[in-house]
Image (cartoon, grey):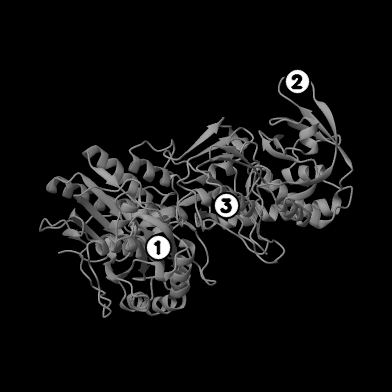
Amino acid sequence: MKKAFVIGSLLVVLTLSLGGSVASKGTDNGATYEQLRLFTEVLSIVQNQYVDEVPPKELIYSAIKGTLRGLDPHSSFLDPDSYKEMQVETSGSFGGLGIEITLKDDVLTVVAPIEGTPAYRAGLHTGDRIVKIDGLATKDMQLPDAVKRMRGRPGTKVTVTIMREGWTEPKDFDITREQIRVHSVRSQDLGNSIAYIKLRQFQEQSPHDLEQTLEKFDKTGMKALILDLRNNPGGLLTAAVEVSEKFIDDGKLVVYTEGRVRNQNMRFSAHAKKGYSKMPMVVLVNQGSASAHAEGPLDPRQGHHAGHRGRGAEGTRGQGAATAVARPDGGPQEGRAAAARSGRHQDHAIDRATASGREPAAGAGARADADDDPIAGRSAKAVGVVPPPFVFSAPGADFGGRARMVVLGIESSCDETAAAVLADGYRVLSSIVASQDDVHAPYGGVVPELASRRHLEVIVPVVERALGEARVRAADLDGIAVTQGPGLVGSLLVGTSLAKALAWVHGLPLVGVNHLEGHIYASFLTDDPPEYPFLALVVSGGHTALYQARAPREYALLGQTRDDAAGEAFDKVAKLLGLGFPGGPIVQRTAEAGDPTAIAFPASRMTDGARDFSFSGIKTSVSLYVKRHGPLSERQTADVAASFQAAVVRMLVRRTLRACVQTGVKRVVLTGGVAANTRLRETLAAEAGVEGVRLHVPPPRLCTDNAAMIAAAGSDRLKAGERARLDLNAIPDLVLAS
C-alpha cells in the first residue's frame, strides 16, 4: 500500500497504533495506569447501566475521537470508513459537493469551493461558516464526520446552512451532489514565452500532469512561468513535494514536519529528474491557498509570491499539519502515529540570496532536527533529522572539483551505534543513533563485551538507514569519517572495520576522528557556531576535560579528571540510590523534587593549583551518606540527588570560568553527554553571562554520542587533506591534546 501523507486543511490525521504504546521519557507510568483504570471503570458502567445498549467498538471509537478532539482541530481518529473516505479524497474523484473545509476556531469553515463544482455554482465562498448539515448542528463535529455527511451518491441532495460575514442570520443552500473529478492542472500560453499553470490541488496525478505540462511549454521555448496556487486547498504531501522539487535545486530541503516525539519528524528534499529552479516565475496565492503552496520557490532572485497571505489553517502561513497514517488493525503500516506541524525550510533562499548579494526571504533559515525510531527491532534514537535530505551548495564550497562535500560519519566508541550523513560539513542530511540502554540497564553500567556484540548486530542497518534517509548512495559519498578513539576497543573495532570496508569497496577517502573532537564539533552543527579561540568543556560518561581550541584542529589540554568522569559519577550515584541506568537523566529527574542545599557534599580541590577535576570524593561522600541514613525515603533520595548534582555542577562551572579568566578567552563550548543536564546548562549560562563569557551549547540530542559530530569533524579534516590508510586501527586511549 502506498504511503499516504496528507497536507492542507481538509484532512489532517492522527492515527494511533492500538497494538502498542508510545511514551516520552519521564512519563509517570503509574499515573497513566491509574487514569486507564478510571477509564475502564467508566466504560464498564456505561456498558452495564446506560439506558441504551451501545456496541463496545462504538464506545471505544468515540473515546478515541474525544481524546484527539481535545488536542487540536487537525488531529482525528480514522475508523475504517473514514480511512476509505480519505483514500477516495486523494484519488481525485468522489461523489460530493466539491468543497474544501477546515476547522477554524472550532467552527467548520470553507477553505475554498473547487471551481466548476456544485458548491462553486451554488455560491459558497472562502470563509463561509457551516453551521448545519442537513439540519444537524456542526458544533463539536469533526472534519471526517462533516466530510462523510456532505459526500454521497451523485444526484442526491444535501442542505448546508451557511453563516457569512456581514449576514445577520444563516442561510440554507440546497446542493445536489455530483461526481467530483478534480483535474488538478490547467494551463495557458500567455505569449512572449510566458506560461501560466494553475494547480488546483495536490493529488496523486498532480506531479505527472504538471511534468507533462512543463515539458509541453519547454518545447515551445518557455522563458518564464506563472504558477497559480490560489484556492489550492492542499492534498497529498508526497504530491506537494514532487511538485515543489521541480522548482528547487536537487538535494535541497522542501518541507519538514516536527512532533513532540522525535520519531514522528519527517523531511523531504528535491530529487527531480529535470528541474526549473532557474526559471523566472511568480507564484500566486490567496486566503484559499493551504499551506501546501509554501513548497513553492522562495528564491529572492528567481521567484516571488504574489497575493494575500492568509491566517491560521486557511492561509499561506497556516500550519497545515502533515501526518502519516498507521493501520490500527494490524494491517500493513503506512506510517506512524504522528502529531506534527509542517514547515518550509528556506536555507536554500539564504544561500542563493547570499550569492546574489540580496537579503533572504523573511523567516528564512528555520531548521529542525531529531527523531526516535527502532532499528531492526532494537531500541534506537536518532539525532538530527528523519530524514533531512537536503544537500545544497554553500557559496564558495568546493571539494574535489565539486560544489559540495557529502561525508558519512560512523560512531561506535561506547554503547551507541550511530551513522550520519553531512553535506558541507554542517548540514545534517540524516543522523541515526541506536541506543543500548536496554542491554546494559540490568548491570547498572556498560558491559564492553555486550556492547561490541550489539554493535555487530545493528551497525549495518544503522548505516543503511542513514544513507537511505539522506537519499545518498555509498558510491556518491565524498568520504567516510569514523571514530578511531578513545573508547572501548571492541566497540571501536566494529566501527573502524566497517568504515575501512566501505572505503575500500567504493574507493572513498577515509579519516579517523577523535571522539572528543567530535563532541567539540557538535557546536558547529548549530545556528550559533563558536569563533576561535574558545574553551571547550567536554563532559561525558567516560571523559571530563577542558580544552583550549586555538584554531581548527589545534587544541591544548587545560585540565581533565584525575579519576571518575562526571557521567560515570552520575551512573554510580544512581546505582547507589537504586534509581537505574543510565544515571544522568534519572538523577536529574529525581533531583527536580529535591533540595540542592540539603546536603553539603564537598567539592574537590587540587593542592597543586591544576585545573583538573575529581569526582571520586563526591561519589564516596554520597555512598557514606546512604549507608549512614539508609534506607532513604523518597524525599531523602531526591535531596541526595539534587545536592550531588549541585556539587558536580558547581565544580564544573567554577573551574571552567576560572580558566576563562586565566587564559583571557571569552567563549566557551559546553558539550558531551553530561552537557544535556539542564542544571549544568542553566548554571553555566547564568554565571558566564555575569563574567561576560559567550556560551555555546549544542542541543541535547547533539551532546550525547552521535555520528553527525564525527562527520563534522571528519569533513574538516578531509578538506584539510588528511587521509587514513586502510590499516587504520582503533586506539582506545587516543589523546586529543596534552
Q: Spatial distance from mark 2 to mark 3, Cα to Cα?
A: 47 Å
Determine which quarter of the picture holds residue 682: top left
Query: Looking at numbered disc 3 in the image, what kind of residue is underneath it?
Result: Glu
Asked if the residue under mark 3 is in contact with the one under mark 1, i.e. CB atoms within 8 Å, the reply is: no
Which quadrant does the C terminus fall into? bottom left
Q: Residue at x 26, y 80 (%)?
A: 727
Q: Which residue is the site of mark 2?
A: 167
Residue beneath the point at 25% across and 55% down: 537
For marks 1 and 3 on the same chain, the one whose residue lies earlier in the sequence: 3
Q: Are marks 1 and 2 in contact (CB under 8 Å)?
A: no
Q: Which residue is mark 1?
A: 421
626 relative to 512 in the view: left or right: right
Between tags 1 and 3, which lies in front?
Answer: 3
Real-space Cα distance between discs 1 and 3?
34 Å
Mark 1 Cα within 10 Å, few/some/many (few <14, many 20+)? many
Looking at the image, tell me whether mark 1 or mark 2 is earlier in sequence order: 2
Residue under label 3, please give it: 215
Residue kind at label 1, given as amino acid type:
Val
- The correct choice, above or below, for 191 with respect to 468 in the image is above
* Secondary structure category for the residue under label 1: strand
| Callout 3 crowding tier (Cα within 10 Å): few <14, some 14–19, many ≥20 | some
| Residues at marks 1 and 2, CA–CA distance in whole angstroms | 57 Å
